[in-house]
Amino acid sequence: MKSGELGKAFVFLIFTLSVVVALYAIAQRNLSDKTPDAFPTPTPISAPSGNIIIETPFADSSVTQDFQIKGKARVFEGIVSIRIRDKLTRKVLFQDTTRAYSQDPAIPGDFSYDAHLSSIESLKPNDLLLLEVFQQSPKDGSDIDLVSIQLRFIPALP
């Protein structure tokens, strides 16, 4: 082989290797963009209006008979309504209110509530629940700014 042909072959080999390496790098980057995190960061769930945000529990969390609900709300007179339903039967298992505290009515205030499910006889392990946080309309009492998340019931260990 002549030295000119050898040089062209070498340039072609380097070019081909560069293309292969570049394609491999692009494939790896695209693959890592689509791979779910081993431990995804839970995100708060918000009403479309942004007036109510549930920070904990996270959607699809497992809860026992006693669990804490935390969030932020910008609601009429600071009253936040909480309801827990059996997802399958839609039966209300728990309903109460709490207050969201804020120095400025235009800024969402923090709320926290320790929920206790007293009527759990009908629940089995892994039954699905719906946590609903909302405000009642001052006009007609209807549910507004409803945020609903699914939870999984796990009985507490004795």
Image (spheres, rainbow, N blue to C red):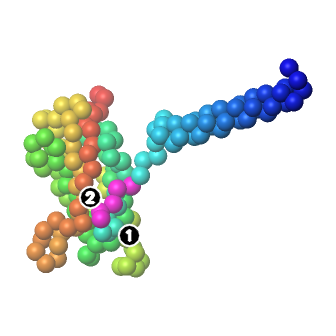
Give the residue at mark 1. 109
Tell whether 26 sits left or right of 80. right
The residue type indicated by label 1 comes to Gly
Q: Nearer the viewer, mark 1 or mark 2?
A: 2
Residue 90 in the figure: left or right of residue 6: left
Q: Is residue 94 magenta?
A: no
Query: Which quadrant would residue 141 be assigned to in this image?
Result: bottom left
Q: Is residue 46 magenta?
A: yes
Where is residue 50? Give x, y as percent.
34, 67
- The magenta region covers 44-48
Q: Position of residue 60 (x, y in %)?
A: 31, 42
**Residue type at mark 2?**
Val
- Mark 1: secondary structure: strand
How far, Cα to Cα, is label 1 from label 2?
16 Å
> Quadrant location of residue 127?
top left
How many neighbours does mark 1 have within 10 angstroms: few (below 14), some (14-19), or many (20 or more)? Answer: many
Residue 126 location in percent, x, y?
24, 32
Q: Which numbered dot is residue 45? A: none
